[in-house]
Amino acid sequence: MGSALGRSFDAARRAVSCYGLAVADDTTNGPLAGFRVINLSSTLLGLFAGQVLADFGAETILVEPPGGHPYRAQPGWPVLSRGSCSNAAGVHRESDVEVIRNLAGRADVVIETWRPGVAERLGLGYEQLREGNPRLVYGSATGFGRDNPLSQIKGYEAVVLAKVGGLDQFSTIVDRDGPGFPTVPNATWSAAHTLLQGVLACLVERERSGLGQRVDTTMVQALGAHDVMGWMIRFMALQYPDAFTQVPFVDPKTRVPNSWMGYALMVGLSKDGRWMQFSQATMKLFRAFLRSVDLDGPEWDDAWDDEDLGRRSAFRDRALEAIRSKTYDEWLEYFDANPDVFAEVFRKDHELMEHPQLLHDGSIIEVDEPGIGPIRQPGPMVQMEGTPGVARPSPALDADGDRLRAEGAERPPAVAAPAAPKTATAPLEGINILELGTFYAGPYGASILSDLGARILKIEQSDGDPIRWQLPTMPEIGAIKALLGKQSVGIDINTPEGQELVKDIARQCQQVLHTFRSGVATRVGLDEPALREVRPDIVYHSGVGFGTSGPYAHRPAYAPTIGAGSGMARRNIGGAVPERTSLTLDQVKDGATTLSAASMTLAHPDGFSAVGVATGMLLGLVAQARGLGGQATQTSMLATVANLLSEDLFEYPDRNPAMTADPGLHGFGPLYRLYETADGWVFLAVTTDREWNAFISVAGDVERDAEALSALFLTRSAADWEKLASGVDVACVEVVKGAYHIVFMDDDGMGRQLGFVTDVSHPLFETHPRLTAYCNFSRSTTVALPAPIIGEHTDAVLTGLLGLSDERIAELKERGVVYSA
């Protein structure tokens, strides 16, 4: 480690305690301290979930096969399994299963990721484990659900993407015909967190009822968090064909954007050959960008919306040339002088670990791993002031086996179940959350909690959240998803009276979510100290882009910014896009199109960050429900994506490289790969010798290499290969054509067929479809409400929650302090 880097890293470590993280020798307890979790999963999904549970204090017992967890062979094992205990126990021997059952009798949580029916067949299903332990929370994550025609398809990441159109959607990242394979675990990480959210919500509810329950989530549902507005745009185009015509975001032939957002989110190459992602997603910021590239003159006015393709193309070319007129360092100087303009560089490999903001926050930590030494890695994803997370070393195989087998040799005493509530309610029923913020990543995290029963009181300015106007030709469409389930309260927070009203609402809330850039909450008198004065036990969650303080805290952060700056885009496509000063303008256009698609095609940083916000908010609510008080908590988009990339984002001597896709972006290797067939494409996922032997028993003897398998797959159609392989329980599935929001969300799509889509009535758009909650519960209910219009609930909240008279409300409206629909 170089001396400058060493000083920077040491300074970051010294700052850790200020930001709610802890290193392994810290004795503080997380919000889950005292809880016991049994992790029965042998998948990456289970490791992601187990990591969070262990980081935040739970004794997380990883039940491994006698030969070890399949991921022990991966270089990321020490990071993914950190903090867990290891118990090597076969699940096919009754004596080992009995030990697990007895341990579960004393546990708070069990998680598993088997296909439906496997746990029950092994004697480890929910009904079998809850006997004598009525407080048990049992979390299951499957690929497609428990009881439908797709339930028995193996839930490998790429198999799920293939079935819902995801791999076809990623055709935008390859320079060949056919679908593309992304390296980032889109569905896996997202489902790990929807599983966590269900489990944490159950733990909050258990403090009220004394009872546990079963929670189910799926990988196909979890992907739904990433569709910001594609579904609603399609819905409007189909509903009103005379008014709207749906066109691609970027013209596939000319690479020219079809809307102003394509220019606001422009990718360009700097003078010194660094790819840069500009992100100016409001008209104010876009106008600032136009000034930065000398395109704010009258001759270019509204060129981005011109129907003349030639004028839009000339506008795009002029912008790319202007971006290329400065080096990256020169652009950074410009950004410092003009804070409404910003672009992140497209980082690659481990460059994110040197990001100034992560170093400032202490989000890059060092864990001393036995047998390896210090490992630099992303720290716990959520920063918690009062109950910080702790990253501890990973376990040696069966390190805790003797202790756990001794404990598990005795059956625990049965515990009588308290009476179940007479009426089923949602797990977060009775929890009020005050939302101060805009756009998607933070606000949609709160919407996830609204589906679990929380009441979200969203404070909006007179013209509403700016996301409502992100598509000027379709007002409100961009906001539907981020506002689902909320109550809109119109208050001008720039006035003293408005600020006092918000504080009065905060008195009735258990939690606050804010997503403002650094300094805004303090300026309007609604920062954490101000709201803690009115409610000392409140949980104040900051769901921000970069951070609440530090070198990037004031920067605008949107999904493309984080996709570029985190290295996520480069992780998806490897070296597919060259980076050098000699690229021609046409090569720059090609590279910009691919880089933009690499982090914005299906699962993207807005979706990941929203899911992370929901998990972070729930950790704060669990701590509060357990009597640990209020505190400041934080998730940032940047730190969340660092956690997503943690299977590769770490450093220790002589580590092996993580799995990456081949240059053609087909897959990880010959047995986990896309193949073209006589008609269409398939994805083959064979991960064990047993699966390989089953496959060749019906496909014929063939070498285990891509060339031989490519020739074999051309002999049949994709549908025939799927039917043949499914007969021997091998995952070889046809790649479904169409984007996820079409395949899954259309009226006759997979989501409707599997029961994951419902209809709601919006004040403006009448009946429209929306996703149901990402989790289903055995005892609790869930909620599916529409999005509000601006100020729809102002009067009801001011009268019902604050007790204001009609006369007082009318007076406040007259003076512009409040407003209603």
Image (cartoon, rainbow, N blue to C red):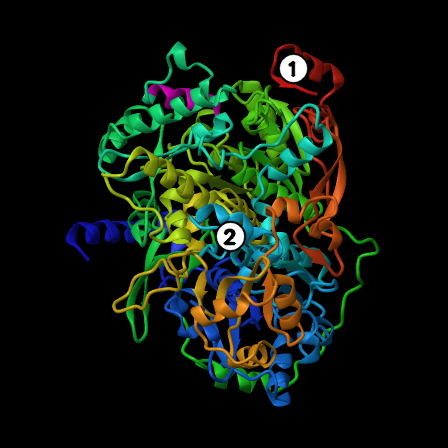
Q: CA distance from mark 1 to mark 2?
A: 59 Å
Amino acid at the residue labelled 1: Leu
Q: Residue furthest left?
A: 3
Q: Which mark is residue 178?
A: 2
Q: Are marks 1 and 2 in contact (CB under 8 Å)?
A: no
Q: 527 left or right of 816?
A: left
Residue 221 x/y as whole percent: 64, 53
**Closer to the camera in the image, 446 or 211:** 446
* Residue occupying the point 44% across, 22% down: 310
Q: Secondary structure at mark 1?
A: helix
**Closer to the camera in the image, 421 or 628:** 421
**Quarter occupied by the C terminus:** top right
Chain-order first, disc 1 or disc 2:
2
* Residue occupying the point 41% across, 69% down: 77
Q: 178 left or right of 446?
A: left
Determine whether 520 is above or below 19 in the image.
above
Determine whether 382 is above or below 483 in the image.
below
Residue annotated with mark 1: 812
**Closer to the camera in the image, 27 or 237:** 237
**Numbered disc in front, either 1 or 2:** 2
Residue extent of the magenta highlight: 282-291
**Quarter occupied by the N terminus:** bottom left
Magenta span: helix, strand or loop, mainly? helix
Place residue 276 in its image quadrant: top left
